[in-house]
Amino acid sequence: MTALAIDIGGTKFAVAVVHSDGTMTRRAELPVGPDPVATLASLVRDAGTAGLTGVGIGSAGPIDALAGTVSPVNIPSWRGFPLVDTVRELLADLHDLPDPHGFPVALAGDGQCMALGEWWRGGHGGHGSASQVLLGIVVSTGVGGGLVLDGVPYLGPTGNAGHIGHIAIDPNGQRCPCGAVGCLETIASGPSMVRWALANGWTCPAAHPDAKALAADAARGVPVAQLAFQRTADALAAAILTTAALFDVDDVVIGGGVAAAGETLLAPLRQAVAKQAGLGFLKRLTVSRTSLERDAGLYGAAALVLPSGERTPYRGP
């Protein structure tokens, strides 16, 4: 069996063809651009449909898996956008499929797909791993997440389960774009980190301040940059431990652009988790960085529609 995997991010789209043995081919990636549908059409056109048995889509959220719609915060033109129907139409128009509505298309959040990809291909579950409950977190332009319970993605009725970025960390904090106050995303997302650092005296050596430049300064020992990462680590630890207390999580994997900072983020995060963990079962948590890098979400999207020996996949509504 072979899947077309689609990864819808806030700043880029990616596609790949993924086979049931985990082989990935025809991977391509493009910036979202001014016309997101045209960008998606270009990628789907180039990927082809020869031999495909299904399509898995991971998208920045929020999403509505029941309706097949998405409302990515960083794509303002997509609010309640019918992504599943659009992909079916693209497949029909571009590749002359006789019955696109009978073609399996599954949708899940991008954080959920990252977690599922790490479980399937990243060494965090199945295949001899001792992990039973995996929490995946994407720390990037926003903060997303997903849960895999005994090899099965837990999506909830709308597909938004595991959306850890909107756990309230600071009830007296900033208002989040989602409408709530003090969400993890208002502290730990890349743009939030940069805004806080600039407001607290960081002078960015680059023309355009971003999380990559902030991480470089933190690695060089610039105090305010290090404080920005410590602040993020403390907030992430609180959200991780809250989730772990609810779901008895034993394995946490961090992905996304901010996670590219490596130990600049992970070292204070592990220390914060150890410091904040109270109950004994929370102390066994392991925290690591994604092993699949930018491909984790694509593997997870494919896994939505591919069987994998030890796992019963979610096939969408």
Image (tube, rainbow, N blue to C red):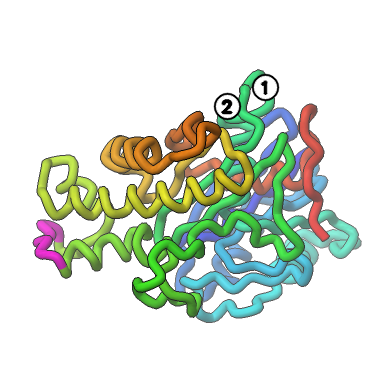
Residue 148 point in image, percent of width and height: 66, 42
Residue 92 point in image, percent of width and height: 80, 65
Give the residue drawn at x 70%, y 54%.
155
Residue 109 point in image, percent of width and height: 62, 58
Number of residues whose C-alpha sits closer than 10 Å to that of mark 1, classed few (under 14), some (14–19) or many (20 or more): few
Residue 245: name its quadrant: top right
Q: Is 203 included in the stretch rendered in magenta?
A: yes
Label at residue 291 = none
Give the residue drawn at x 50%, y 37%.
279
Which residue is label 2 attached to? 123
| In this picture, residue 105 sits left or right of residue 130 | right
Please say if the residues under marks 1 and 2 sit with CB atoms less than 8 Å apart: yes
Residue 6 point in image, percent of width and height: 63, 54
Disc 2 marks a residue whose amino acid type is: Gly
**Of residues 7 and 277, the one drawn nearer to the viewer in this rendering:** 277
The main secondary structure of the magenta stretch is: loop
Label at residue 127 = 1
Give the residue drawn at x 52%, y 57%.
164
- Quarter holding the N terminus? top right
- Residue 236 visible in the snapshot: yes
Which residue is at the far top? 128
Disc 1 marks a residue whose amino acid type is: His
